[in-house]
Amino acid sequence: MKSKPGLGTRDSGLVAIPNQAVLAVRRLKVHYRLPSARPWGKPGWLKAVDGVDFNLANGETLGIVGESGCGKSTLARALAGLQPVTSGGIEYNGRNIARLDEAAWRPLRREIQMVFQDPLASLDPRMTIGASVAEPLEALYPDVGKAERMARVREMLEKVGLSANLINRYPHEFSGGQCQRVGIARALVVRPRVLICDEPVSALDVSVQAQIVNLLADLQAEYGLSMLFIAHDLAVVRHISRRVMVMYLGKVMEQAPRDALFESPVHPYTRALLASVPGDLGRERREPLHGEIPSPADPPAGCVFVTRCPIADAHCARHAPNLVRAVHGGFSACHFTATNVA
């Protein structure tokens, strides 16, 4: 994509390397300290993200799925610099950004942007949509003049399917889908390389979800974005993603190319998730998932899925599995990976 005059090239000093990982996440942990239940007791830890590993390639869309409470949103916020990291690494084009302070993160805001789950709550009700979309440009490109800035805002609103004539209206005058389009415009107006979408369609009507997903796919292709798409709707993830990562209780259970994961899932948790989906995705699968996800403040010893797994044994209860190469070309964290392929 050519640089727009006045905005210049992205000048954070981070240059993408073709065909290599834009983001490389290694053993990432985000733990929250919990107060003790008794004055003399020891404090506990809530392990929201607990040793996550993955790569995101240039121009790729990685879908991240899992039940509520599995750590997807915490992971997204950590990758966007909005959540402190306990340990592990987040490399952006070879530079570890896991422990940067707010000042050091500022130039990276031009490179890594986020679209949030609740479209209306993510917009300031006192600001017009034009002002909301312009705000990142004002903060991150202060040398750009007002006329050029507003021209860029109008252009981006048109890109996301909103008339530039609506620039002086307020969020309450728009539908949820329209507000999410504004949120996407605000994220993309600074021309990031990485877009993190944290359940961007879960708060929208079903009839609008497909429009937003198709819009994101079109913009991803047009701008060559590397995108993380977080959702609990497997059908949506299958539509937009190139690879899929499955999380459970803060850990990665399986990751694989999209078609391989949906057609030949290896991990019993992935198979159970697919079995619980009505229609074609759940067809010819084993028994769907039963029971509730344990608390991340008190995860099971050994494999975190052991309390709900239909094939777990005593070894699973004592020993946590590592992510190992699976026959479908991806990875799985299961002691029975070699024998669990459909």
Image (cartoon, rainbow, N blue to C red):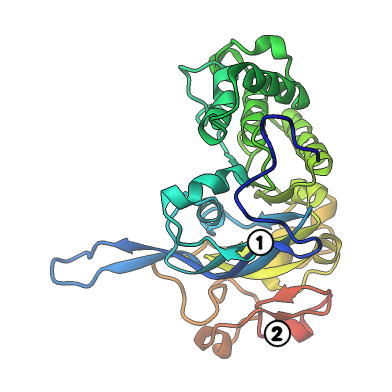
Viewer can see residue 275: no
Q: Is residue 34 left or right of residue 16?
A: left
Q: Nearer the viewer, residue 73 or 96?
A: 96
In the picture of the structure, the residue carrying the numbered disc 1 is 93
Amino acid type, mark 1: Asn
Task: Please tell me how crowded label 1 is: few (under 14), some (14-19), or many (20+) other residues with Cα within 10 Å.
Answer: some
Viewer can see residue 101: yes
Give the residue at x 53% y 58%. 71
Q: Please, what secondary structure does the residue beneath circle 2 have?
A: loop
Tell me residue 97's x, y (percent).
Answer: 52, 60
Give the residue at x 81% y 41%. 1
Q: Nearer the viewer, residue 212 or 182?
A: 182
Tell me residue 165's x, y (percent).
Answer: 70, 9
Total marks in image: 2
Give the residue at x 47% y 49%. 82
Q: Mark on residue 336?
A: 2
- Quarter of the rendering containing residue 276: bottom right
